[in-house]
Amino acid sequence: MSKKIFSGVQPTGNLHLGNYIGAIKNFVSLQNDPNNFCIYCVVDLHAITVKQNPFELKKNIRETAAAFIASGLDYKKSIIFNQSLVPAHAEGSWMLSCIARMGWLNRMTQFKEKAGKDKEKASVGLYIYPVLMAADILLYDATHVPVGEDQKQHLELSRDIANKFNLDFDSPNFLTPPEPLIQKNFARIMSLKDGTKKMSKSDPSELSRINLNDTSDQVLNKIKKAKTDNDPLPDNQNELSKRPEAENLLGIYSSLSDQPLNTTIKEFSGQNFSSFKEKLADLAVHKILPISKEINKLLKDENFLDNVLIEGAEKANQIASEKIKQLKKIVGF
């Protein structure tokens, strides 16, 4: 069965190993399935829900595009573009925000987490960005969306909006309620300094993450200094629930070597962390260094990256603008 897949990544700069294993690596696998039509978006409109430095934002948009391409996304096979180049996203978001209900948005847990205790100072954009996410997806009739568990609620909102629009305007199947594609294994890569926290660019410690543009020395040093416990590596998966750092490092190894976690556990059962870390570091350098070199090479050619995004936006606009025309006609504009 053919799938139309849409996913987006915020241009926050310094994409890291967690972004690669938890999302981009999966994007490449989906793209390489001939039954899939894939659209990958640098969601720069989402980025401005919090204050951005304009110079840094432009740099981060290019860096995200470079990471996509360096990791194996093919702009000739997939549509790769940045959101702000396609006006239909903002236009569609307004029309769909008139369908979405306040009660639905009030249930969004990510807003509560990101806004913190002082919600009154959060931007309106941060509150309603799940509606923009719905527009991103629904404008392309996406059938499937790769999401983490933390985004599953937003996808449910997209489905609610699609179903309500179709019902309110007596337009069966006009908007396609998307299905989630939840990565079962290694969807959340944790900090190298704390196995209970997700790997994040916002962590003040550079040692907490491996950036996709790190050098081999940086990768080796970060894995060498990664937090562990004092016991030998386990011989079964059940033991890992009490050992978050061991689970995280074994998961990283499994993902980078494309093998099941149980296979990795058998391979290193009873060994100490120092010998395991050496092999993990070698594997990480082998996988990450080519990506790092390609990112740095691509970043030197800004015109190429800009042209990839512009050409992708032209393709995306053909699809999204046609959907907007139909949307307007149904609404009565």
Image (spheres, rainbow, N blue to C red):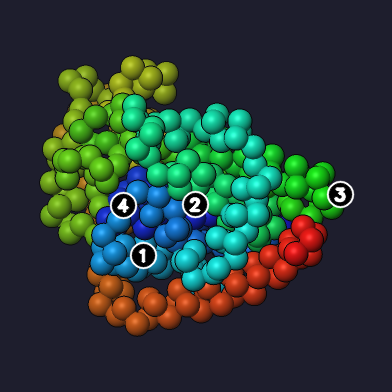
Distance from the alpha carbon under mark 3 to that under mark 1? 39 Å
The x and y percentages for residue 328 are 73, 63
Q: Is residue 291 above or below residue 22?
A: below
Residue holding disc 2:
26
Residue holding disc 3:
170
* Label whose residue precedes the other's in the sequence (3 or 2): 2
Res 73 seen here = no
Residue holding disc 1:
61
Depth check, mark 4 against mark 2: the one in front is 4
Distance from the alpha carbon under mark 3 to that under mark 2? 37 Å
Residue at position x 45%, y 44% in the image: 124
Q: Are marks 1 and 2 in contact (CB under 8 Å)?
A: no
The x and y percentages for residue 301 are 30, 80
* Label whose residue precedes the other's in the sequence (4 or 2): 2
Distance from the alpha carbon under mark 1 to that under mark 2? 20 Å
The x and y percentages for residue 208 are 21, 40
